[in-house]
Amino acid sequence: MLQTAPSRAGPPPAHAPDAGAPILSIQRLGKSYDKDKRVLDGIDLDIRRGEIFALLGPNGAGKTTLISIVCGIVNPGEGRVLVDGHDIVRDYRAARSVIGLVPQELTTDAFETVWATVSYSRGLFGHPPDPAHIERILRQLTLWDKRDAKIMTLSGGMKRRVLIAKALSHEPRLLFLDEPTAGVDVKLRQEMWQVVRELRESGVTVILTTHYIEEAEEMADRVGVINGGKLLLVEEKAALMQKLGRKELVLTLQEPARAVPAALEPYDLALSDDGFELRYTYNTRAEETDIARLLEAVAGAGLRLRDVTTRQSSLEDIFVDLVGERA
Ligand SMILES: Nc1ncnc2c1ncn2[C@@H]1O[C@H](COP(=O)(O)OP(=O)(O)OP(=O)(O)O)[C@@H](O)[C@H]1O
């Protein structure tokens, strides 16, 4: 379990953020690398303190550009970004100090030790050395035993955890994880998810970009879907799945059907290849569904049922509807 960073003694900071205000506020953000192509187009997004927000989109959607702007790596085109109330352009130092970024690529100093590289990252933010804090994060990320190991000797999973430790070295309150589990195996992916949950419990707000639906479905409190530089929607994950979700009713037959009987055509049923299953898709939001009438029509057509089951559509189905491709 990760621990909350200890509060520091001393006077309150000159800038005392409003606890109810979003930790990140993106307003009408636009970006073009060249004249003809909008990479980000009118993005408005507020991130709440303490949430895990998944920014979901296919390759080239603009995810990395968006977080690179917030992190001060890429210049914003138009619009305004406030991090904990600090404007990322006018007040970039204060804004940057709130943010930790775990980049997509494994860029670590191969010949350095874990301890040295994480301590160095803290120094880059102008923070005085704090061995107790570095020890705490290395223990949290189960890297303590490896503190004297050179980065190049570590496994892929450990290297990823070193990147997180580096990003946490200056005690950020907002952590960006750019494609945290791209190309990693299932075990490592679950390990990363656990680390992220524990970070959230420790009070860090997490924004992760991903093109794995499963990751957003598993991790996020809220999901934003981005495509072609536009934020298509932002929703509570649970509400999103309910609102846009559909259900599939699967009717398993006692004997296989060769074709969908003419009387059932209005229901637009799909027949499985073996003829044993008829599938009916319906909207869970509809006040009234046709299920009762469908079942009567099935009996009327002389089909005998062995079983009836339903399946809720997944975030993947929703994503395909929105973006028009599988992640
Ligand atoms: N430095 C750059 N110069 C010109 N075009 C760029 C630059 N960086 C990104 N782009 C373009 O901007 C678009 C968005 O890229 P971006 O990397 O933000 O997408 P992404 O959603 O993060 O995709 P991926 O999942 O592949 O990283 C792409 O069409 C990309 O080719």
Image (cartoon, helix red, strand yellow):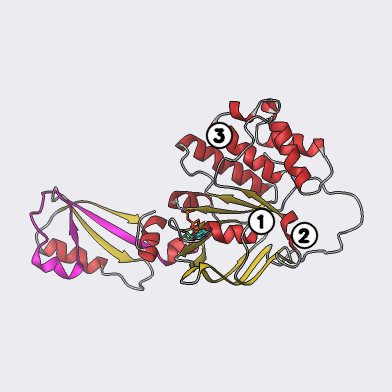
State the CA–CA distance, disc 1 to disc 3.
25 Å
Q: Nearer the viewer, mark 2 or mark 3?
A: 2
Is 270 part of what is drawn in magenta?
yes
Q: SS class of the residue under badge 3?
A: helix
Residue 273, percent across and down? 15, 50
> Of residues 97 and 186, which is closer to you in this image?
97
Task: Inspect the image, locate mark 2, and give the three-letter code of the amino acid beneath it.
Answer: Ala
> Of residues 248 and 182, which is closer to you in this image?
182
Q: Which mark is residue 50?
A: 1
Task: Inspect the image, locate mark 1, and give the three-letter code of the amino acid beneath it.
Answer: Gly
Q: Are marks 2 and 3 in contact (CB under 8 Å)?
A: no
Q: Which mark is residue 157?
A: 3
Residue 314 at least partly seen: no
State the CA–CA distance, disc 1 to disc 2.
19 Å
Q: Residue 94 carries which label?
A: 2
Residue 218, percent across and down? 49, 49
Q: Earlier in the sequence, mark 1 or mark 3?
A: 1
Q: In this view, does 141 lie above or below 170?
A: above
Q: Residue 112 carries which label?
A: none
State the CA–CA distance, disc 2 to disc 3.
31 Å
Is 312 part of what is drawn in magenta?
no
The magenta region covers 244-273
Disc 1 crowd rating (10 Å Cα; few below 14, some 14-19, many 20+) is: some
As drawn, the residue found furthest toward the right would be 10
> Of residues 107 and 181, which is closer to you in this image?
107
Residue 223, percent across and down? 51, 60
Please give left or right for residue 124 compared with residue 246 in the image.
right
Q: Which of marks 2 and 3 is nearer the N terminus?
A: 2
